[in-house]
Image (tube, grey):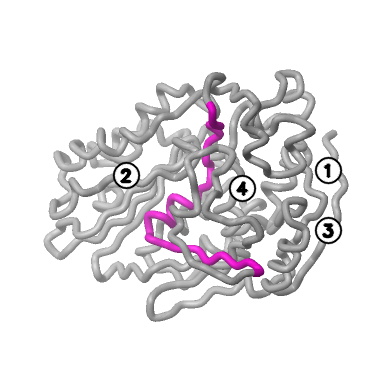
Amino acid sequence: MMHIPEFRYLAPTTVDEVARLLAEHGPEAMLMAGGTDLIPNLKRRQQTPKVVVGLRAVAELKTAKIGPKGVTLGAGITLADAARSPLLSRGHRAVQMAAGRVATPQIQNMGTLGGNLCLDTRCNYYDQSWDWRKAIDFCKKAPGPQGVAQKVVDEARTGTCWVAPGSPRCWAVSSTDCAPALAALGASVTLVSAEGRRTIPVLNLYKNDGMDYLAGRKPGEVLTSIDVPLLDPHAGWRSTYWKLRRRGSFDFPVLSVAAAFKRNAAGEVEEARVVLGSVASCPIAVPTESLIGKKLTDDVIKAFLPIAAKPARPLDNTDFHLSWRKRVVESWVAGALGDIRGDDPSKSLLARTAARLLPVAG
């Protein structure tokens, strides 16, 4: 039985109070929304904060509204509510699919949209019990007693990355479902601290480093809301999210593909965003210039697949063999673009290629 270490729990009721508490307690404090990620990490002693600032009583984080420029979702709304939000149109389908495929319904009812965006990176060597990690001499991301009590990246650099022992960085993988989907939709996030507030694109929140993965969020900041642009399906917008995992529920993704396209009446692509998840320590945006001005024919999609798969460099740090995870990227992107095109999976050649792996997909 793994027990949670002792900490002081604070329950602010406003965002300003949260910011004040973070400034007051500094690196000794951590935020907790739904707790579905932090609580297991505490049990494994991956983090041992002296202060936990709970966000559940902050009503401002649970609001959702629609405006002339788009939809604003509070970071504290549950994944279940995000999956069925009436404010999101079919153009926002990707984020609804992503939120609705996180783990199990019970976790979706507890986990929050903001919490999923800030999800800790994962690794076969990191996500183990304290005793297991101690037996292999810990790792860069959680190097032992001197490094688990606080997020001090520079100090932890002295450890060993067991995925790539000679590497100067950590290769833990980003496993958030909602970040690739929201990035594909062109969303941005608002961050608040005692010094003020600022808004940045979702992709700017992340860095391709397993330890410093949330480099875009400064110390003392809390993520308060997500702004999603209006993507009118009547104007040609369509989006989707494809997730690969061993079991049809509960498991983290080993690959995800989020795509959002705007096509004109002739079917030609005017705007396109494709974002890969779980292939690096952050979501990876794929170059889509080769698709602009073209129809999504089989030949166009096939020519795009090597471009989409090139940024994916999976390592031996999560489920399935890394070489297979690399090969499957093309199939999954083909399926996602076929979905955007409106294919019937039972009839489309490209969709059938991806569908061969659907029994392990969520």
Look at discs 4 and 1 and give the one toward the viewer.
1
Label 4 environment density (alpha carbons within 10 Å; few <14, some 14–19, many ≥20): some
Is there CB contact under 8 Å for labels 4 and 2? no
Label 3 environment density (alpha carbons within 10 Å; few <14, some 14–19, many ≥20): some
Q: CA distance from mark 2 to mark 3?
A: 41 Å
Q: Earlier in the sequence, mark 4 or mark 3?
A: 3
Q: Give the residue at mark 2.
A: 286
Look at the image and give the residue range highlighted in magenta.
168-194
Amino acid carrying mark 4 in the image: Thr
Q: CA distance from mark 4 to mark 3?
A: 27 Å
Amino acid carrying mark 3 in the image: Tyr
Is there CB contact under 8 Å for labels 2 and 3? no
Label 1 environment density (alpha carbons within 10 Å; few <14, some 14–19, many ≥20): some
Residue 109 sits in quarter: bottom right
Q: Give the residue at mark 1.
A: 4
Amino acid carrying mark 1 in the image: Ile
